[in-house]
């Protein structure tokens, strides 16, 4: 199995992902329905655990493809399930 194949991840609603930025920092997002990602108001110099991220507020929402998560470009650091379908 190649390195690329071993990094494949499933795409699920409620996942928290670390998004690498060009300057070496990380942004974080939460996967919503319809390929929306809520981006948290939080940047870090290294990849932080999910507990450090989920208490932050969502700064904005953006539409992304699932390719970044499935390919491993965005790293899944955990999940925070939604309380119900409408959330």
Image (cartoon, grey):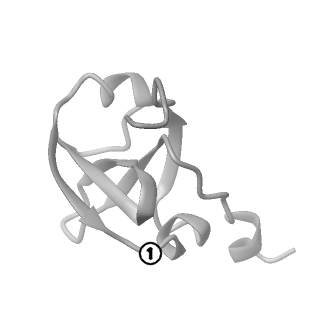
Which corner quadrant of the image does residue 35 belong to? bottom left
Q: Name the residue: 50% across, 54% down.
A: 75
6 versus 28 height, above or below: below
The quadrant of the picture occupied by the C terminus is top left
Q: Quadrant of residue 2?
A: bottom right
Residue 37 % position (x, y): 33, 56
Q: Look at the picture and state if 86 lies above or below 39.
A: above
Name the residue: 67% across, 64% down. Answer: 7
As drawn, which residue projects farthest toward the front? 86
Q: Position of residue 68 (x, y in %)?
A: 48, 71
Q: How many marks?
A: 1
Residue at 32%, 25% (x, y): give it. 52
Quarter that holds the N terminus: bottom right
State the image coordinates of residue 79 (x, y, percent, origin top left): 52, 34
Task: Examine the rendered structure and indicate whether residue 37 appears above or below residue 56.
Answer: below
Label 1: few (<14), some (14–19) or many (≥20) C-alpha neighbours in 10 Å: few
Identify the residue under disc 1. 65
What percent of the width, then of the height, locates residue 77?
A: 50, 40
Q: Identify the residue at horizontal 49%, vertical 36% (top origin).
A: 85
- As helix, strand or loop, the secondary structure at mark 1 comes to loop
Residue 59 picture quarter:
top left
Most foreground residue, 59 or 73: 59
């Amino acid at each position: 199995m190649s390195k690329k194949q071993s990094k494949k991840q499933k795409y699920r609603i409620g996942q928290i992902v670390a998004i690498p930025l060009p300057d070496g920092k990380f942004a974080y997002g939460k996967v919503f329905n319809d390929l929306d990602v809520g981006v948290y108001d939080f940047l870090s110099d290294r990849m932080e655990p999910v507990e450090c991220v989920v208490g932050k507020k969502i700064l904005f929402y953006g539409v992304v493809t699932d390719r970044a998560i499935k390919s491993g470009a965005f790293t899944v650091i955990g999940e925070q399930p939604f309380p119900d379908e409408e959330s």
